[in-house]
Image (tube, grey):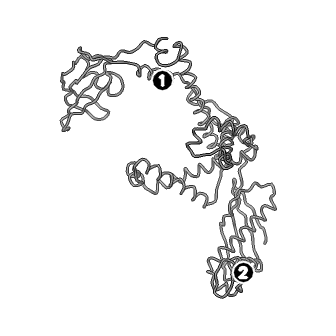
């Protein structure tokens, strides 16, 4: 075999090799011998039939495929010997082009793809720049506090006119509706309450009024009847309120607890976002490719997951396509693109594990098991077995690798600050 070229682009390398007619004859002989051991030929024990007889039971296409795979494998092995520092992946070499006729007495020119692990050490990640995430939990804490107030707010029936903040039950009848629509809302709060505020303020329980309100691009007109009115008894936000919603000694303690919880949640979301941005930036910096069969398998697996999710939610694939106004072809493209992104992420994670020797120690595995017992049990993972412990080890390594990448990248000021 004459090894001619090795053209590299990203992590994809195209290898070119030439096999002489004698080398093809040898490969053909080896292929026939391998097939002879699998075939059941009348009058002969497996593997004992003469190759001239075996040839009568072998299809040309099958023989050609086997010879090409052997030639591709030899090309790959030659590459590994010549480029000993290459960190090649364990993918079957992908045949790009083969110039050869199985029946012709001539050599073979073969181009194959091999794929390397990308470079993903600390220096690489330190060269990746991503936009940081601005964190401000003030609004989140306010929303949490408002939700607590709503939870303990009581109401009582009211005889007087409706005012801002009252909780009212109404029935609405429009000219096109056969039946009245009944709903309940707080006056002046939320989209519905604010929209009807000019109509209902001043009305009393049992009163009916004709109305006309603007709803985005459409006008809604009809008759509105107040079914009931209740006034809210909103508690004062003080130390007593804090004690009523939990084991807090003061309002300050409650606010600090809410702030710390939202801060932890925001930091976790920030790190998740930074990791996703780091992977995306790394792929832009170092394009990654995969064998076609790997991409096809990943896309099919992702499609199967989508179908399972739809089934769990009581939807068929055709219904999903109809509701989202997309074609099956577009869905296939979207799923393939998503599958490739996941492959790129996983490949970068594996490359980082290897380059940086990230591993999980016994204490780390045990600590994870103790902290996540319920989740592991729910997923059916028995950490007492060797297989279960290996799964936990992979989880720990995954988390450590995410943290490593997130901490290593360079951050620039967030645009939303």
Asked where in the image residue 362 lies, by quadrant, the reply is: top right
Q: Residues within 10 Å of mark 2 (few under 14, many from 20)?
A: some
Tell me which residue sits at (20%, 38%) in the image: 177
Q: What whole-number distance in Å separates the C-alpha atoms at marks 2 and 1?
A: 78 Å
Of the 4 image quadrants, the one containing the C terminus is top right
Tell me residue 255's x, y (percent): 53, 17
Q: Does residue 352 appear to the left or right of 189 in the view shown?
A: right
Q: Nearer the viewer, mark 2 or mark 1?
A: 1
Q: Of residues 312 and 210, which is closer to you in this image?
A: 312
Decide: is 69 above or below 221: below
Decide: is 400 above or below 189: below
Tell me residue 263's x, y (percent): 58, 25
Q: Disc number at residue 144?
A: 1
Tell me which residue sits at (60%, 61%) in the image: 293
Decide: is 86 above or below 256: below
Asked where in the image residue 131 lies, by quadrant, the reply is: top right
Of the 4 image quadrants, the one containing the N terminus is bottom right
Total marks placed: 2
What kind of element bears circle 2? loop
Tell me residue 410's x, y (percent): 69, 35
Q: Does residue 232 appear to the left or right of 299 in the view shown?
A: left
Q: Disc number at residue 106?
A: 2
What kind of element bears circle 1? helix
Q: Does residue 310 appear to the left or right of 26 in the view shown?
A: left
Tell me which residue sits at (62%, 29%) in the image: 413
Tell me residue 136's x, y (percent): 55, 24
């Amino acid at each position: 075999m004459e090894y001619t070229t090795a053209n590299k682009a990203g992590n994809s390398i195209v290898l070119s090799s030439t096999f002489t007619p004698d080398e093809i004859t040898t490969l053909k002989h080896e292929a026939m011998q391998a097939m002879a051991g699998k075939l059941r030929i009348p009058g002969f024990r497996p593997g004992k039939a003469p190759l001239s007889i075996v040839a009568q039971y072998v299809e040309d296409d099958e023989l050609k495929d086997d010879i090409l795979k052997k030639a591709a494998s030899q090309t790959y092995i030659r590459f590994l010997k010549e480029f000993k520092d290459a960190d090649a992946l364990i993918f079957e070499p992908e045949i790009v082009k083969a110039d050869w006729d199985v029946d012709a007495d001539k050599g073979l020119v073969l181009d194959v793809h091999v794929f390397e692990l990308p470079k993903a050490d600390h220096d690489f990640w330190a060269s990746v720049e991503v936009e940081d995430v601005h964190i401000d939990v003030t609004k989140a804490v306010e929303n949490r506090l408002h939700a607590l107030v709503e939870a303990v707010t009581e109401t009582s029936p009211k005889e007087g006119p409706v005012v801002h903040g009252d909780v009212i039950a109404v029935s609405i009848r429009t000219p096109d509706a056969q039946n009245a629509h009944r709903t309940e809302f707080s006056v002046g709060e939320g989209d519905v309450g604010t929209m009807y505020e000019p109509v209902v303020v001043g009305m009393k329980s049992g009163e009916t009024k004709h109305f006309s309100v603007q709803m985005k691009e459409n006008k809604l007109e009809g008759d509105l009847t107040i079914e009931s009115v209740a006034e809210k008894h909103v508690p004062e936000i003080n130390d007593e309120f804090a004690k009523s919603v939990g084991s807090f000694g003061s309002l300050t303690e409650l606010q600090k607890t809410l702030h710390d919880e939202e801060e932890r949640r925001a930091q976790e979301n920030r790190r998740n976002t930074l990791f996703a941005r780091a992977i995306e930036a790394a792929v832009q910096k170092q394009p990654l490719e995969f064998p076609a069969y790997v991409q096809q398998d990943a896309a099919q697996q992702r499609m199967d997951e989508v179908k399972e999710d739809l089934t769990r939610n009581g939807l068929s694939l055709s219904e999903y396509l109809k509701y989202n106004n997309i074609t099956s072809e577009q869905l296939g493209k979207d799923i393939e693109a998503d599958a490739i992104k996941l492959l790129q992420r996983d490949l970068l994670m594996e490359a980082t594990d290897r380059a940086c020797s990230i591993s999980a120690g016994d204490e780390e595995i045990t600590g994870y098991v103790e902290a996540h017992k319920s989740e592991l049990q729910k997923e059916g993972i028995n950490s007492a077995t060797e297989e279960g412990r290996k799964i936990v080890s992979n989880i720990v390594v995954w988390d450590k690798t995410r943290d490593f990448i997130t901490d290593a990248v360079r951050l620039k000021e967030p645009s939303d600050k």
